[in-house]
Amino acid sequence: MIKMTIKKIVLGAFCAMSLGALAQKSNIESAAIYLRNGEVEDAKKSIDLAIVHPDTKADAKAWFYYVSILDTIYRNPAYANLMDADIADKFYTGCIKCIETDLKNKYGYYCKDQAILNSAFMNFNKGIAAYEQKDFKSAIKYYETVLTVIPYDKNEDLKKNNLSEKNIFLYMALSAMQSNDNAKSKIYLKKLMDLNYDDPIIYMQMANIFLEETDTTSALQYIDQGRGKYPSEKDLINQELNIYMSMGRQDVLVDKLNAAIEINPDDPMLLFVRGTVFDNYANDVNKKRKSIKEQVTTARKKAQIEKAPAKKTLYIKNADDLQKEYDNQGKRVTEYAAKAEVDYKKVVELNPDYIDAYYNLGALTNNKTTDIVEKMNAIPNSLQGAAYDKIYNPLKKQKDDILMVALNYFNQALALAEQKTDDTPEKKKEKNGYMRDILYSIQQVYANLGDEKKTMETKKKRDSIE
């Protein structure tokens, strides 16, 4: 009795399993029939049951029809109500399952050679849509799916439609950068470099990420890498120059500028930057000169009041040595200013609308009067009348002549500033900023010329600007 009962139980279980398998096989056949008859909704219901049942979830035929039905739904607007939000993901998964379970390659002509490629287009379109909706994380997920399909693209159909590995990594990099995911951005940009993606912007973007992370060394390494591949690319050159400028590495900056100008000798921007560097050199040395001048004055005062001959001699020698240093530094200022002037003049020759070059020429020219004013102030008070005028007047004329040249440059800058548009708040702010700075410089020139009327007129005009 016990044995017979066991046999019946086992037999009953076996029959139930067979009937279940047959039922699922029937669902596959039903799905096929429904699909052929255009009864897509019923076809989907049948195949959805088959692909999850233990007896048919590894059946290649089930996955073949699953993919075929989803493909039909996706392509036909009439079946929009049957389309799941994640149809692209399901379609891709179905293709992979079909390929993996199709050990005899019975359905390879469709699943492996056609449908899987269609899934790439589906996922790419979903990625674009997600990107436009600023869902960058989802966009990357869809693009990653496209990448896994590329190995199946034997005839390069994806590549012919711009879905190459390079382009997909570019879309992924853009998505990662938009979402401020620096880690992924660096991975994707590096992959583009490894794939020899032909665009200098990827090196600039990589450098910007490292700059954002305050890793200047790595930023410069990638700029250098990009410059090696694109030696005459202006944006890379400019980015490199900006970094060295922000670092205060004027020595390296000049070398880099000289090299860049050799490649682009008529680039106004490069010439302007180099002129600015030389200008800054001159200003920095002038600051040191001011400190030395104060030391000279102090040493001479000490020498005047010192009674002990030895100390007095020491103070005089110290003052003389400092004066020599002051004069030598003055020569350096003149050299740097001359180099800056050459570059600025070349800039306005190449681009007559370069307002900053005109303004800097005005400021640089105005600074040439510094030593002349010192000489005027150093005329001994003991000189009076004609003796005083004999020294003072030539110096004043020299100073005024220089100031008139500076004034001309400032007026040219002002004319360009007045032509600037101000139809947006940003443009108006920029224009007014230029106007105020230039008018202030013009006001100072008139004051130094002793023209009180023009000084006040210019001040009034400046004060009227918002």
Image (spheres, rainbow, N blue to C red):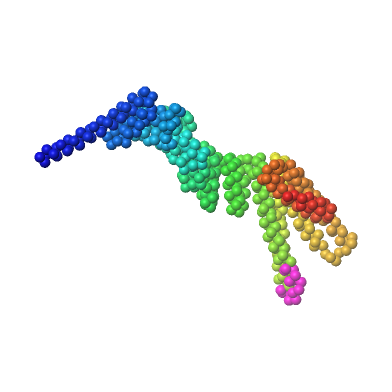
Q: Residue at x 36, y 28 (%)?
A: 43
In front of the other: 31 or 268: 31
In front of the other: 274 or 146: 146
Residue positioned most to the bottom: 308
Q: Residue at x 71, y 57 (%)?
A: 330
- From the viewer's perspective, tell me whether residue 105 is left or right of residue 362: left
Residue positioned most to the left: 1
How far across and down, in percent of the image, does residue 267 sit? 65, 41
Q: As displayed, is residue 21 above or below residue 284?
A: above
How far across and down, in percent of the image, does residue 299 sit? 72, 68
- From the viewer's perspective, tell me whether residue 200 is left or right of residue 377: left
Residue positioned most to the right: 386
Could you tell me if residue 117 is visible in this image?
Answer: no
Secondary structure character of the magenta stretch overall: helix
Quadrant in the picture for residue 305: bottom right
Q: Which residues are magenta?
A: 298-311
Q: Residue at x 32, y 34 (%)?
A: 49
How far across and down, in percent of the image, does residue 11 sit? 17, 35
How far across and down, in percent of the image, does residue 182 sit? 49, 47
Q: Residue at x 61, y 51 (%)?
A: 245
Queried whether the magenta region covers residue 301, the answer comes back as: yes
| Count of marks placed on residues | 0
Could you tell me if residue 82 is visible in this image?
Answer: yes
In front of the other: 104 or 373: 104
Q: As displayed, is residue 80 above or below residue 411?
A: above
User: Which quadrant, please, contains the N terminus?
Assistant: top left
Queried whether the magenta region covers residue 276, the answer comes back as: no
